[in-house]
Image: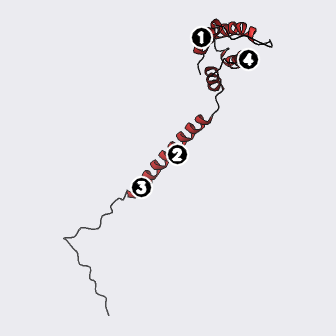
Amino acid sequence: MPEKNFDIPLHDIKPIVEVQEYSLYYFILLIAIALFLLFALSYLLFKYWKKKKRYNKRAEDKKALESLSFEDPKKAAYALTLYGATFSHDSARHQEMYQNLLGRLENYKYKKRVENIDEETLSYYQLYKEMCDV
């Protein structure tokens, strides 16, 4: 039996056109941007946490200088010598001020009994404390 051909030309219907689909690329781009933002945020949080946890000797010594008690003058003189040495090498002015303060504290260090620290030495201490910065 002969085969019949039903291929009738259609004049009203256009052929199938291939449409470009970009939604997968948009989705991949969106995921890449989200991952980049996530990594950037986690990196910034890590840096903030690490900076916050880092030990800062200058800040600790500055805090110790500010909270120094002069009830025991001998102990205060030794503490001022110890904590003030951290800031003594900042500039020539700091070095000179620190040496001047050490000279004034000599009277309160190496004796068994010492009197209270005089007002002039305390004013030098206040001035040196204000000069120090972290």
Q: Position of residue 116 (x, y in %)?
A: 69, 11
Q: Which mark is residue 39?
A: 2
> Badge 1 is on which residue?
127
Residue at the (26%, 79%) spot, across then down: 7
Q: Is residue 38 left or right of residue 85?
A: left
The quadrant holding residue 98 is top right
Q: Mark 4 or mark 1: which comes first in sequence?
A: 4
Viewer-nearest of labels 3 and 2? Answer: 2
Q: What distance separates the C-alpha of mark 4 from that of mark 2?
A: 49 Å
* Residue type pointed to by label 2: Phe
Residue nearer the viewer, 12 or 31: 31
Q: What distance separates the C-alpha of mark 3 from that of mark 2?
A: 18 Å
- Residue with the most extreme bottom position: 1
Check disc 3: other Cα within 10 Å, few if <14, some if 14-19, many if 20+. Answer: few
> Badge 4 is on which residue?
78
Are circles 3 and 2 on residues that touch, CB within 8 Å?
Answer: no
* Residue type pointed to by label 4: Tyr
Residue nearer the viewer, 86 or 20: 86
> Badge 3 is on which residue?
27
Q: Position of residue 40 (x, y in %)?
A: 51, 42
Check disc 1: other Cα within 10 Å, few if <14, some if 14-19, many if 20+. Answer: few
Q: What distance separates the C-alpha of mark 3 from that of mark 1?
A: 63 Å
Check disc 4: other Cα within 10 Å, few if <14, some if 14-19, many if 20+. Answer: some
